[in-house]
Image: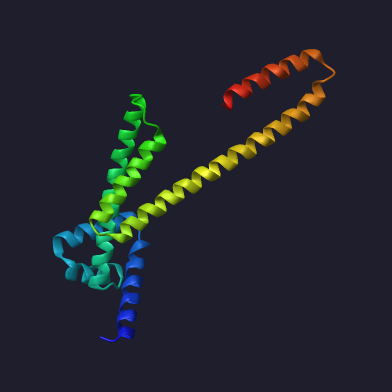
């Protein structure tokens, strides 16, 4: 097979697998169960006849592998979250970040041990998204705090001439300071 034909075949496999990725989760699960009882060849025919989805056996095999591993990782992640909560509650000295890092290492090692670069890449992307979300959350919090501070300064100017209102303002400001810590 020429290099051009191999490249075209790989492109078709990626296209057929990507159409499966866009399906609703319930249908993905039905496809997985169907393939386990009937095999790849019957599943390809079933997908075409029942759902009008054209996919090659190779594309389906690759998609099923990724889908199964992703499901397993999600189950393992849920278990890890439970372990993290238990560790935090037991005050054993681990921070949430340390446990998160340990989980990241665990899942990466698992993917690499299975020789699955796709899953490893998926794990890294999830970690990157989590870091970005934390960064965005920090930015949002800082923005809200600065807006709150600006509003409180403007409010204090109105209360300068009234000592009773200023005392209540100071009490409210002390409470807000305690809440933001």
- Give the image quarter of residue 95: top left
| Placement of 13 over or under 29, stated as above or below | below
Q: From what the image shows, is residue 124 above or below residue 14?
A: above
Tell me where residue 43 appears, x and y as whole percent: 21, 67
Q: Is residue 92 above or below residue 3?
A: above
Residue 108 at x, y percent in the picture: 31, 51
Q: Position of residue 2 (x, y in %)?
A: 29, 87
Q: In screen coordinates, is 12 left or right of 175?
A: left
Q: How many marks?
A: 0
**155 or 99, nearer to the observer:** 99
Side of 68 where 172 appears, left or right: right
Color scheme of the displayed model = rainbow
The image shows residue 138 at horizontal and vertical percentages of 56, 40
Image-quadrant location for residue 85: top left
Q: Residue furthest bottom?
A: 2
Query: Residue at horizontal 36%, vertical 57%?
Result: 121
Pick the quarter of the image with the C terminus.
top right
- Compared to residue 96, the image places residue 42 above or below, namely below
For image coordinates 31% across by 84% down, the residue present is: 3
**Residue with the most extreme right position:** 161
Q: Residue at x 72, y 16 (%)?
A: 168
Q: Seen in the image, is 179 located left or right of residue 81?
A: right
Residue drawn at x 68%, y 16% is 171
Quarter of the figure that contains the N terminus: bottom left
The residue furthest top is 164
Viewer-closest of 175 and 51: 175
């Amino acid at each position: 097979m020429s290099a051009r034909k191999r490249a075209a075949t790989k492109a078709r496999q990626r296209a057929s697998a990507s159409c499966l990725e866009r399906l609703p989760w319930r249908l993905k699960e039905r496809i997985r169960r169907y393939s386990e009882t009937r095999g790849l060849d019957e599943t390809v025919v079933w997908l075409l006849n029942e759902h009008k989805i054209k996919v090659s056996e190779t594309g389906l095999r690759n998609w099923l592998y990724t889908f199964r591993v992703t499901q397993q990782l999600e189950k393992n992640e849920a278990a890890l979250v439970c372990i993290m909560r238990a560790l935090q509650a037991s005050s054993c000295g681990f921070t949430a970040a340390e446990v998160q890092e340990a989980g990241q290492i665990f899942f990466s090692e698992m993917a690499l041990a299975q020789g699955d670069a796709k899953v490893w890449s998926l794990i890294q992307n999830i970690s990157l998204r989590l870091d970005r979300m934390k960064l965005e959350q920090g930015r949002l919090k800082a923005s809200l705090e600065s807006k709150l501070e600006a509003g409180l300064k403007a409010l204090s100017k109105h209360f300068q001439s009234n000592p009773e209102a200023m005392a209540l303002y100071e009490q409210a400001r002390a409470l807000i300071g305690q809440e933001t810590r």
